[in-house]
Image (cartoon, rainbow, N blue to C red):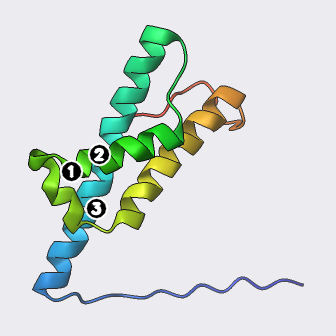
Amino acid sequence: MFVNKTYKFRIYPNKEQGILIAKTIGGSRFVFNRFLSLWNDTYKETGKGVTYPSCSAELTQLKKHQDMRWLKEVDSTALQSSLKNLADAFLRFFKKQNDMHSTFAPEFL
């Protein structure tokens, strides 16, 4: 017999930590939406999407632009996870792997 246990943790971030959490969430959302737009535009033009490695390389270049320097303040692992989640969502969509949502493409957050 298996028993499922649940643990709840509540965090109490100080002001500095709260700002960092907000930046991380905002940066992840920005990266997801920007590359979703790129993915959709590329698919409409060529009939093929972009790949995770090309998006990852473009994210690295994006961080170097003067207007996007704020992305360096955010944890790079969180930004890369957003890209991986997007790539996985499209992979599952095209393979029709998700039974419930197989007819819906990934959407903006």
Q: Position of residue 56 (x, y in %)?
A: 43, 47
Question: Residue 71 falls in which quadrant of the image?
Answer: bottom left
Mark 3 is on which residue type?
Ile
| Residue at the image position 49 percent from the left and 11 percent from the top | 46
Q: Position of residue 80 (x, y in %)?
A: 43, 56
Q: Is residue 80 left or right of residue 47?
A: left
How packed mark 2 is, by other alpha carbons closer than 10 Å (few <14, some 14-19, many 20 or more), is: few
- Residue 64's label in the rendered image is 1
Question: What is the distance, in whole Å, between disc 1 and disc 2 at their CAs?
Answer: 5 Å
| Residue at the image position 43 percent from the left and 40 percent from the top | 55
Mark 1 is on which residue type?
Lys
How packed mark 3 is, by other alpha carbons closer than 10 Å (few <14, some 14-19, many 20 or more), is: some
Mark 2 is on which residue type?
Gln
Of the image marks 3 and 2, the number of the one nearer the N terminus: 3
- Residue 38's label in the rendered image is none
- Are discs 3 and 2 less than 8 Å apart at CB? no
User: Camera-side residue: 72 or 82?
Assistant: 72
| Residue at the image position 31 percent from the left and 88 percent from the top | 11
Identify the residue position indicated by label 3 in the image: 25
* Relative to 20, residue 76 above or below: above
| Residue at the image position 65 percent from the left and 27 percent from the top | 94
- Residue 61's label in the rendered image is 2
Q: Position of residue 17 (x, y in %)?
A: 20, 82
Quadrant of the frame with the C terminus:
top left
* Residue at the right extreme, as displayed: 1
Look at discs 3 and 1 and give the one toward the viewer. Answer: 1
- Are discs 1 and 2 less than 8 Å apart at CB? yes
Q: In terms of secondary structure, where does tag 1 sit?
A: helix
User: Camera-side residue: 32 or 56?
Assistant: 56
Q: Position of residue 107 (x, y in %)?
A: 41, 34
Q: Is residue 21 left or right of residue 3?
A: left
Q: In terms of secondary structure, where does tag 2 sit?
A: helix
